[in-house]
């Protein structure tokens, strides 16, 4: 479907039933899986005898598998649509989560964690693809923000509720329960979401779709936007879903209950931030102000917050955690703009997947590399790390994000730009 066809888009009720509920629930589970190790980390360290790098690798196995599947995912979404692709993937997630809960050694845990990553890879991208099919172009940033907000509920669930489940029943039982919810999600998507007929004729050949990915990666506009999205979103994901918990304990000095509260505040900030940023972008779009300028302003606020963390500021840690979560994913507002740039809904899967590949590549590097930096300083005790290590690791993240921000500002794309090579 090309946006210049001007199809008749369904109303709010249909959007809620066919997009927000089924795909939002899938993204809810995706973010829950992504973040739950931040709460379960002490138990995983105790049961498996992991060091910081080992914990980072086990958790980041999700991210590297997630990232590796992004390009095939984009082609599959554009060819077969979000209903069939996402129902199959979330079913794989359920099987992998059950395997994780039953695994008896590190190797099987890592393989199962990678399977969860592949199965969760479509959580957000399938929702974004569905939005591109069911929502008119000016309203897509807000619709995408609503999908992300449901993911924020997954982050919240991965904090105090997950801590309660792990404390009372153990992390293995938690993953068994998540497996059941994943299979339920697959069923909901399959039953609630109708097939969306293509409005632009038969699906193009596999060769042409793969060639479309090459067009995305060869476009200079993509490389103006991609570093900003990948550096900010990727570092934020890597920190929030693993190292934020240890930071709250080792630097801010919170106990285990306080860490869970801090992670809950961060997750609530994520929820509030996605809703506010989407609403602001939606309102300003009606006044002719492009999301190309809205998103970087939010990113700048995030850089200021991260600078405070890098400086070792620990006063009001729950406020800092809330603010970190609120602004960390601001650059994701640029996803629908880039999809429109490459031709609209029929290209959304591939253009979004290209951005997501880079973002989750950075997220993996952050989770794994952050642990490696922490290991450069002697551990205070098992599972606790020197505050200087956190400052060094945060400084690396901040530097990469600041350089990407300056790169974008040096030559931002024109608000009305449209690629000459449509996918």
Image (tube, rainbow, N blue to C red):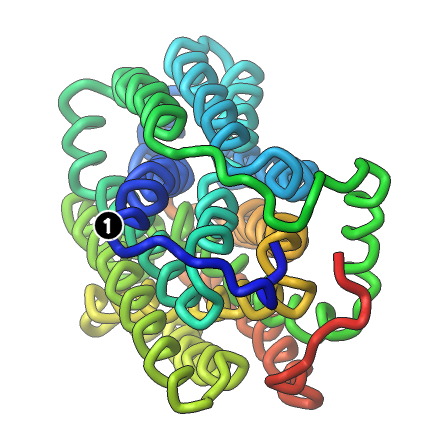
Q: Nearer the viewer, residue 317 or 414?
A: 414
Quick check: 243 left or right of 341?
A: left
Query: Relative to 231, is 197 above or below?
Result: above
Element marked by disc 1: helix
State how many labels appear: 1
Residue 276 in percent (x, y) is at 28, 72
Please tell me which residue is depicted at 50% across the width and 84% down the height of the picture: 290
Quick check: 207 left or right of 51?
A: right
Please tell me which residue is depicted at 52% across the width and 67% down the height of the picture: 232
Choose top left, top right, bottom left or bottom right for residue 185: top left
Residue 151 in percent (x, y) is at 33, 48
Q: Nearer the viewer, residue 400 or 148?
A: 148
Please tell me which residue is depicted at 67% across the width and 63% down the height of the picture: 343
Residue at the disc numbered 1: 13
Residue 48 in percent (x, y) is at 44, 21
Q: Nearer the viewer, residue 108 or 184?
A: 184
The answer, for residue 331, to whether it is visible in the render is yes
Q: Nearer the viewer, residue 29 or 251?
A: 29
Q: What quarter of the picture does the C terminus occupy? A: bottom right
Please tell me which residue is depicted at 26% across the width and 62% down the height of the picture: 252
């Amino acid at each position: 479907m090309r946006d210049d066809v001007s199809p008749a888009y369904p109303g709010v009720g249909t959007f809620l039933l066919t997009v927000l509920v089924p795909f939002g629930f899938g993204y809810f589970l995706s973010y829950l899986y992504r973040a739950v190790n931040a709460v379960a980390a002490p138990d995983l360290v105790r049961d498996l005898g992991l060091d910081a790098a080992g914990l980072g690798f086990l958790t980041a196995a999700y991210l590297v598998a997630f990232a590796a599947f992004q390009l095939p995912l984009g082609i599959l979404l554009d060819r077969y649509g979000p209903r069939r692709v996402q129902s199959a993937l979330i079913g794989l997630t359920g099987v992998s989560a059950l395997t994780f809960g039953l695994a008896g050694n590190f190797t099987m845990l890592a393989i199962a964690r990678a399977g969860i990553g592949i199965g969760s890879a479509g959580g957000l991208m399938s929702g974004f693809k569905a939005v591109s099919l069911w929502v008119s172009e000016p309203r897509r940033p807000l619709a995408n923000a609503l999908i992300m907000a449901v993911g924020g509920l997954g982050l919240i669930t991965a904090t105090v509720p997950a801590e309660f489940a792990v404390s009372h029943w153990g992390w293995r039982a938690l993953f068994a329960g998540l497996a059941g919810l994943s299979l339920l999600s697959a069923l909901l998507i399959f039953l609630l979401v109708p097939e969306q007929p293509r409005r632009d004729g038969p699906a193009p050949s596999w060769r042409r779709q793969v060639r479309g990915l090459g067009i995305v990666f060869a476009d200079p506009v993509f490389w103006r936007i991609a570093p900003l999205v990948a550096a900010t979103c990727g570092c934020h994901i890597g920190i929030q879903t693993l190292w934020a918990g240890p930071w709250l304990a080792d630097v801010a000095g919170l106990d285990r209950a306080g860490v869970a509260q801090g992670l809950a505040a961060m997750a609530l900030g994520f929820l509030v931030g996605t809703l506010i940023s989407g609403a602001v972008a939606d309102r300003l779009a009606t006044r002719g102000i492009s999301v190309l300028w809205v998103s970087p302003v939010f990113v700048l606020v995030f850089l200021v917050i991260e600078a405070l963390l890098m400086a070792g500021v620990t006063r009001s840690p729950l406020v800092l955690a809330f603010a970190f979560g609120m602004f960390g994913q601001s650059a994701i507002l640029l996803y629908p703009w880039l999809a429109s740039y490459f031709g609209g809904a029929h290209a959304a899967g591939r253009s979004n997947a290209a951005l997501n590949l880079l973002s989750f590549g950075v997220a993996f590097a952050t989770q794994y590399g952050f642990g490696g930096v922490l290991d450069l300083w002697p551990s205070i005790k098992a599972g606790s790390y020197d505050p200087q290590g956190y400052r060094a690791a945060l400084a690396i993240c901040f530097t990469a994000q600041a350089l990407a921000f300056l790169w974008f500002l040096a030559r931002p794309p024109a608000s009305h730009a449209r690629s000459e090579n449509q996918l």
